[in-house]
Image: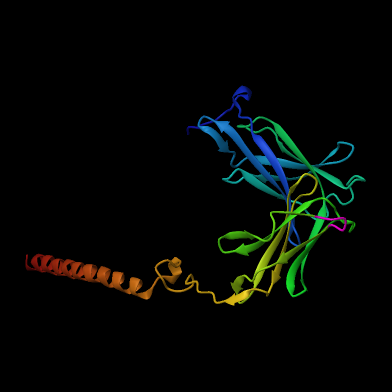
């Protein structure tokens, strides 16, 4: 048995460039997105299959080990923050700090990266004012106090991506509030529209998203043929004629071959019997 052992001396290990981002999807989940890359022989590459140990850092600089996560092919790993983590160990300013650590890795040097953020909540509602629909979004901290001076944006989900509604961004006022009028009618399947309100990459609160569905669009029918038997549909929706005719051709080739093979076998057997 031959064993191949790949060892990376300390001076030959790669230095991983690590970045952390905090995300909160309202009514769904909160997580830290860990991204890692390194400079290889062919330039910068994504650090896939790289394991991180995640810790919570307290105000006295003590650490609480939480879990391990491993990067995917894109060099990213998602660490889910459970609701009960940090609730009793947070400092008086409600600032949470987490640390991602590379330790004793065969390929990468020991590295640690931390991120600090405060938690906040984002809500979105729809109202009609003077015959015009308006989206109202409120940003508040975990105690319900409004957050002023942060920038939100509103997008409409479309099949091809997101369509910006109104201005590029709106600053929250002293009530943590923004109001975005919907000035034009927009089409939606059965009149349903899905809006996304985002606080993006805030230095204090990270990225927070809130979603809202509203039946205020111009109704259109879903003309997609994805679920029909067309050439561009999934394999399980292949048109019947493409299933039937190729199989008939295959049978038309194999049946004569099998018939000839059977006859050759009978001829050879008859010759043996005569002998």
Residue at 57% across, 31% down: 39
**Horizontal side, residue 239 vs residue 8: left or right:** left
On screen, residue 159 above or below 67: below
Q: Position of residue 268 (x, y in %)?
A: 12, 65
Residue at 41% across, 71% down: 230
Residue at 35% across, 72% down: 243
Q: Quadrant of the C terminus?
A: bottom left
On screen, residue 161 above or below 11: below
On screen, residue 79 above or below 222: above
- Which contiguous range is marked in magenta? 172-176
Residue at 86% across, 37% down: 62
**Horizontal side, residue 130 vs residue 175: left or right:** left
Q: Position of residue 183 (x, y in %)?
A: 68, 68
Between 108 and 24, which is closer to the camera in this rendering?
24
Q: Which color scheme is applied?
A: rainbow
Q: Residue furthest right?
A: 92
Considering the whole magenta stretch, tell me its main secondary structure.
loop
Count numbered badges in the picture: 0
Residue 55: quadrant of the picture: top right
Residue 35: quadrant of the picture: top right
Q: Residue furthest top?
A: 11
Residue 248: quadrant of the picture: bottom left
Q: Residue furthest front?
A: 130
233 in magenta: no
Q: Position of residue 247 (x, y in %)?
A: 30, 71
Between 188 and 56, which is closer to the camera in this rendering?
188
Between 269 and 198, which is closer to the camera in this rendering?
198
**Horizontal side, residue 173 vs residue 7: left or right:** right
Q: Position of residue 245 (x, y in %)?
A: 29, 72
């Amino acid at each position: 048995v031959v064993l191949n052992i790949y060892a990376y001396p300390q001076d030959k290990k790669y230095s991983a460039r690590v970045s952390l981002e905090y995300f909160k999807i309202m009514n769904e989940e909160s997580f830290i997105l860990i991204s890692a890359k390194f400079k290889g022989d062919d330039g910068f590459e994504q650090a896939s299959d790289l394991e991180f140990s995640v810790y919570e850092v307290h105000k006295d600089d003590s650490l609480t080990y939480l879990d391990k996560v491993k990067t995917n092919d894109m060099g990213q790993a998602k660490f889910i923050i459970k609701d009960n983590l940090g609730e009793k160990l947070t400092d008086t300013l409600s600032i949470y700090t987490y640390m991602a650590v590379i330790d004793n890795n065969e390929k990468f040097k020991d590295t640690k990266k931390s991120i600090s953020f405060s938690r906040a909540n984002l809500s979105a509602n729809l109202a009609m004012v003077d015959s015009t629909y308006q989206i109202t979004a409120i940003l508040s901290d975990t105690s319900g106090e409004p957050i002023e001076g942060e920038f939100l944006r509103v997008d409409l989900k479309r099949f091809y991506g997101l369509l910006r509604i109104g201005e590029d961004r709106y600053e929250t006022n002293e009530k943590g509030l923004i109001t975005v009028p919907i000035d034009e009618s927009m089409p939606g399947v059965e009149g349903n529209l899905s809006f996304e309100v985002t606080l993006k990459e805030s230095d204090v609160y990270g990225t927070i998203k809130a979603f809202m569905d509203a039946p205020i669009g111009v109704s259109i029918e879903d003309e997609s043929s994805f679920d029909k038997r067309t050439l561009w549909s999934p394999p399980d929706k292949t048109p019947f004629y493409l299933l039937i005719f190729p199989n008939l051709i295959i049978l038309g080739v194999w049946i004569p071959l099998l018939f000839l093979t059977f006859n050759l076998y009978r001829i050879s057997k008859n010759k043996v019997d005569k002998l």
